[in-house]
Image (tube, helix red, strand yellow):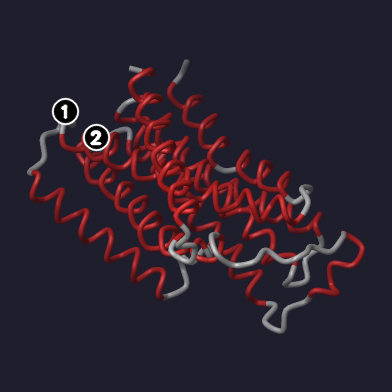
Amino acid sequence: MDLLIWIIIFSILGGVLSVIVASGFLLLPANARQYAVPHLISFAIGALLGASFLGLLPHAIEHEYSVDPHHLGLTLLLGLLSFFLLEKMVLWRHCHSHHGHEHIPELGDDHHGHQHQDPHKAAGTLILIGDGIHNFVDGVLIAAAFLTDVHLGIVTALAIAAHEIPQELGDFVILLHSGFSRRKALYFNMLSSLATVVGAVIAYFLLADLQQILPYILVVAASSFIYIAVADLIPGLHSKVELSETVQQISLIAAGVVFIYLAHSTLH
């Protein structure tokens, strides 16, 4: 299959399909959503860390265009600090830290969406803008991974999809409580998710002749995944300190890592 087709298919998986799956969770009873989301987040943490340490970083180090490991280490460090600054500037904020420990409120129906308006209605618009930027970058990372190795591209897209589902569910809640109806929230979230495909296609054409910078982009992708997992997702898990909850969290994180490991080894 043509590489561009692979990239388009899996960028759709990482973006549009994640929105569709997340919207399906809105049909579940509130208590079912409250139970499912923290488990999804734990699994996503494992998938993100697994993709970073078992896929992206090893491929960056072993890339055909040999790069000084010290330069890659510096790139990883600068990437982590950059994502911290971007989040501080509310350009990269996706409320990951809220999904694991904050109550997901009841959702109104399509005909009464405006009854839940937030005084800060700009929050919904800000979420969409942030999502668009985030999804565009995800597309670039998926394309860069595919240009390095098809198997790495698939693993990267799977990790992105894993963390996008709980994130998109939280974004739906914010949009609905900012005054959007369910239909409009789905429409605008879907539109925002298409930025993944746009970013992937643009990156495919721009990076095809710039193979020498792919190791650095893979490291930036890893820094993005690590930052989201460690800075945004993991803190929310600490609100539940019961032994049974901790065991579940560790088990699901491990399951996410194993999922990426098996996907990577099986594809090879």
Name the residue tied to disc 1.
Answer: 64
Query: Which of the two labelled residues, at mark 2 and mark 1, occupies the earlier sequence position?
Result: 1
Residue 172 placement (x, y as % from top left): 68, 59
Label 2 Cα crowd, 10 Å radius (few <14 / some 14-19 / many 20+): some
Q: Identify the amino acid type marked 1.
A: Glu
**Which of these two is toward me, 242 or 8?**
242
Residue 93 placement (x, y as % from top left): 49, 66
Label 1 Cα crowd, 10 Å radius (few <14 / some 14-19 / many 20+): few
Residue 58 placement (x, y as % from top left): 21, 35
Do the numbered discs 2 and 1 sit on residues whose CB atoms are within 8 Å?
Answer: yes
Name the secondary structure under disc 1. loop
Name the residue tied to disc 2.
Answer: 211
Q: Which residue sits at x=60%, y=52%?
A: 37
Q: Which residue sits at x=41%, y=69%?
A: 87
Q: Which residue reaches farthest right?
A: 111
Q: Which residue reaches farthest front?
A: 243
In this rendering, is residue 6 above or below 87? above
Mark sitting on residue 176: none
Name the secondary structure under disc 2. helix
**Which of these two is toward me, 228 or 42?**
42
Q: Is residue 230 left or right of residue 125?
A: left
Picture quadrant where residue 59 is located:
top left
Q: Is residue 107 left or right of residue 255?
A: right
Residue 258 placement (x, y as % from top left): 38, 32
**Which of these two is toward me, 65 or 230?**
230
Mark 2 or 1, which is nearer the eye? 1
In this rendering, is residue 94 above or below 187? below
